[in-house]
Amino acid sequence: MYRLENKVALVTGASRGIGRAIAIKLAQCGARVVINYTSQEAEAQKTLELMGSDAQDSRIMRFDVSSEEEVIKAVNLIVEEMGSLDILVNNAGIAVDGLLMRIKSEDFDRQISINLKGAFNCSKAASRFMIKNKSGRIINISSVVGQMGNAGQCVYAAAKAGLVGLTKSMAKELASRNILVNAVTPGYIATDMTKDILNKNMPEIIEHIPLKRVGQPEDIAHAVAFLASSDASYITGQVLSVNGGVYI
């Protein structure tokens, strides 16, 4: 178990799926976790409840990561009430699939605003405090789709690929202040977001995964906990692929 006692972590999009698993794992490691959500308050509350006795001073917090104003207010409030912000996990994201010739402009804007600009907004706001403390961890949840592309997901892939570029550039900018920035790229993970495609194409998907199984949200959570811990103190600007070997 990685040790994150006395650390304050913000996990965006933590009301379900991968974000929920990450929030629970960081709490198990001793961190006080802010569970961000946009609309699903009941699910965010469930994440908090699932932490059980590990919840400590953890809490839910509603704000839209695509709004710079809301993000700044939220991050300021976290630091004011909890005394610090040591770990940021940019997990919030949406997928609106569609072929290039059919995808709507507003669906492009929405995916970029949440998946990429959201991470930019949160990182910019959090880094102000991390720079003062000369310490911090920023972990961006990208996707294997951002590495290998996928038909029908041009926009989603572009946003997730953008996260990789953002990760590497921030890592170079912030290294002198001991702020480590890394990305995790999940493969096929069993969540609400992927259940339709998994249910429809499971045999074909499994055939292309060397480990012959889809991943679980906890597989991503373990990777994030490692990158957030002192055991990863000499790792920055890297992309950790957790994909069962589907893309090597």
Image (cartoon, rainbow, N blue to C red):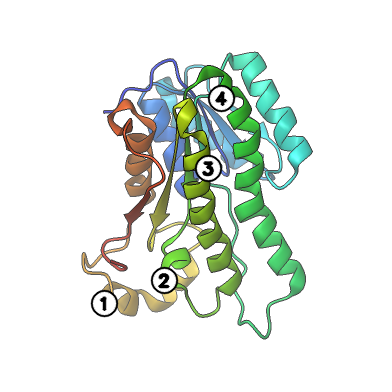
Mark 1 near mark 3, Cβ–Cβ under 8 Å?
no
Is residue 37 at all visible to an observer of this figure?
A: no
User: x, y percentage for residue 21?
Assistant: 42, 41
- Which is more toward the observer, 141 or 36? 141
**Residue at point 51%, 62% (across, down):** 161
Residue with the most extreme bottom position: 101
- Which is more toward the observer, 244 or 69? 69
Answer with mark 2 or mark 1, whichever residue precedes in sequence.
2
C-alpha span from label 4 to label 2: 34 Å
Within 10 Å of disc 3 (Cα), the crowding (few <14, some 14-19, many 20+) is many
**Residue at point 43%, 25% (across, down):** 52
Q: Quadrant of the N terminus?
A: top left
Q: Which mark is residue 10?
A: none
Answer with mark 4 or mark 2, whichever residue precedes in sequence.
4
Q: Determine whether the residue tagged by mark 1 lies in a helix, strand or loop.
A: helix
Q: Which mark is residue 131?
A: 4
- Which is more toward the observer, 16 or 124? 124
User: x, y percentage for residue 92?
Assistant: 58, 48
Amino acid on which disc 4 is placed: Ile
**Residue at point 53%, 67% (across, down):** 157
For disc 1, the marked residue is: 207
For disc 2, the marked residue is: 148
C-alpha span from label 2 to label 1: 17 Å
C-alpha span from label 1 to label 4: 46 Å
**Residue at point 42%, 34% (across, down):** 24
Is residue 155 at all visible to an observer of this figure?
A: yes
For disc 3, the marked residue is: 170
Q: Determine whether the residue tagged by mark 4 lies in a helix, strand or loop.
A: helix
Answer with mark 4 or mark 3, whichever residue precedes in sequence.
4
Could you tell whether 5 is left or right of 141 in the image? Answer: left
Mark 2 near mark 1, Cβ–Cβ under 8 Å?
no
C-alpha span from label 1 to label 3: 36 Å
